[in-house]
Image (cartoon, rainbow, N blue to C red):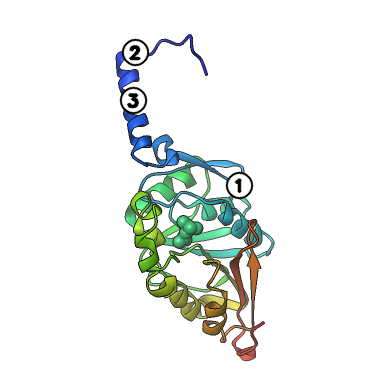
C-alpha cells in the first residue's frame, strides 16, 4: 500500500518468510499476532484458537444477562473474559493450557482489566458460585477433526471434543449446576448438530434453549439452573 517505501534487506527477508508461512497454510491471524473480535483487537499466538464470528454471538448473548459474577471455562485467548470485564463484570476465567493463559493475561493487560485467571481442568481450580458460566469449549468430533484443515493449523486442545465432539460439553453440563447460583445461567457454544444430544444431557436444568448463529445454524445453549424444576427441557 506504500509502493515508494524501500525495505531494508532484513525487512524484505522477514516479509518473504511470512509470505512463505502463509503459503504453507499458517493462518494470517497467527502471522499478524492479532485478530479483531467484537470491535476490539486481541493478541493471539498459535497456542490459542483464532476467534470466530460465531463466538461474537456467544458474547452478545452473555451481555444480555445482568449477571455480575461470571465464570468462563476454556478461555483460550481470553477474548470473552476480557470483553465481559470491560463491561464491568466480575470475571474468573479458566484454561487448562498455561500457554493460552499467558495470551489471555496479555489481553487483560492490553485492555487494562482485572480478570481472575485460573489454570486447570474445567472446574478443578474453581471455588464458589456464579451468576453466569460460559464457555466455547472444544466441540469437534475427534474422528472428523482428523480430516479437517483446521487440525493442522490451530491447537487440537481447543478443537478436539472427543467422541461426537461431546466430551467437554457433557462434563460442563454435568458439573455447572454445582457452581451456579439459584437463578444462574449457563451459556455454551456448540456444534451445529449437537442440539439434540445437549438437550438429552441437560435434563437437570430448569430450562434449556438452543439459539442459532449468524449463519442460521444451531450454535448456542442457554441453560438455566434451578434443580427443583429438573426435567423441563424445551
Ligand atoms: N468453531 C470452530 C471451528 O469450527 C470450533 C471451535 C471449538 O471447537 N470451540 O473450527
| Residue on which disc 2 sits | 8
**Residue 141 in the image, given as x and y percentages of width and height:** 41, 68
Dot placed on the residue nearer the N-terminal end, 3 or 1: 3
Residue 125 image point, x, y percent: 38, 69
- Of labels 2 and 3, earlier in sequence is 2
In this rendering, position of residue 212 left or right of residue 136: right
In screen coordinates, is 126 left or right of 59? left
- Quarter holding the C terminus is bottom right
The image quadrant of residue 189 is: bottom right
Marker disc for residue 16: 3
SS of the residue at dot 1?
Answer: loop
Image coordinates for residue 68, horizontal then vertical, percent: 62, 63
Q: Is residue 136 above or below residue 186?
A: above
Tell whether circle 2 marks a residue whose Cβ is less than 8 angstroms from ligand 1: no
* SS assignment at label 2: loop
What kind of element bears circle 3?
helix
* Cα distance between the residues tagged 1 and 2: 36 Å
Q: Earlier in the sequence, mark 1 or mark 2?
A: 2
Residue drawn 57% across and 74% down?
195
How much space separates mark 3 and mark 1, taking CA atoms? 31 Å
Q: Residues within 10 Å of mark 1 (few under 14, many from 20)?
A: some
Q: At x 52% / y 19%, what residue is drawn? A: 1
Mark carried by residue 38: 1
Given contact means CB atoms under 8 Å apart, are the residues at marks 1 and 2 in contact?
no
Within 10 Å of the Cα at label 3, are there few (<14), some (14-19), or many (20+) other Cα atoms? Answer: few
Q: Which numbered circle lies on residue 96?
A: none
Q: Is residue 215 above or below residue 37?
A: below
Q: Residues within 10 Å of mark 2 (few under 14, many from 20)?
A: few
| Foreground pick, 186 / 142 | 142
Q: For the point 40% across and 41% down, which residue is it? A: 30
- Residue in view at x 45 percent, y 40 percent: 29
Question: Between tags 3 and 1, which lies in front?
Answer: 3
Amino acid at each position: 500500500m506504500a509502493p515508494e517505501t524501500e525495505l531494508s534487506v532484513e525487512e524484505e527477508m522477514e516479509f518473504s518468510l511470512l509470505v512463505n508461512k502463509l503459503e504453507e497454510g499458517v493462518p494470517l491471524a497467527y502471522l499478524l499476532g492479532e485478530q479483531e473480535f467484537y470491535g476490539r483487537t486481541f493478541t493471539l499466538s498459535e497456542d490459542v484458537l483464532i476467534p470466530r464470528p460465531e463466538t461474537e454471538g456467544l458474547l452478545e448473548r452473555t451481555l444480555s444477562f445482568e449477571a455480575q459474577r461470571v465464570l468462563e471455562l476454556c478461555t483460550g485467548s481470553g477474548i470473552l473474559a476480557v470483553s465481559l470485564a470491560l463491561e464491568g463484570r466480575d470475571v474468573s476465567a479458566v484454561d487448562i493450557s498455561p500457554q493460552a493463559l499467558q495470551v489471555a493475561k496479555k489481553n487483560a493487560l492490553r485492555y487494562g482489566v482485572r480478570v481472575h485467571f485460573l489454570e486447570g481442568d474445567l472446574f478443578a481450580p474453581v471455588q464458589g458460585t456464579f451468576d453466569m458460566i460460559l464457555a466455547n469449549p472444544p466441540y469437534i468430533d475427534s474422528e472428523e477433526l482428523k480430516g479437517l484443515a483446521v487440525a493442522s493449523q490451530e491447537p487440537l486442545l481447543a478443537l478436539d471434543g472427543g467422541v461426537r465432539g461431546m466430551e467437554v460439553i457433557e462434563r460442563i453440563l454435568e458439573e455447572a449446576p454445582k457452581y451456579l447460583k439459584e437463578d444462574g445461567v449457563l451459556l455454551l457454544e456448540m456444534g451445529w448438530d449437537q442440539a439434540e444430544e445437549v438437550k438429552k444431557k441437560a435434563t437437570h436444568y430448569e430450562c434449556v434453549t438452543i439459539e442459532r448463529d449468524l449463519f442460521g445454524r444451531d450454535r448456542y445453549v442457554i441453560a438455566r439452573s434451578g434443580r427443583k424444576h429438573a426435567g423441563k427441557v424445551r
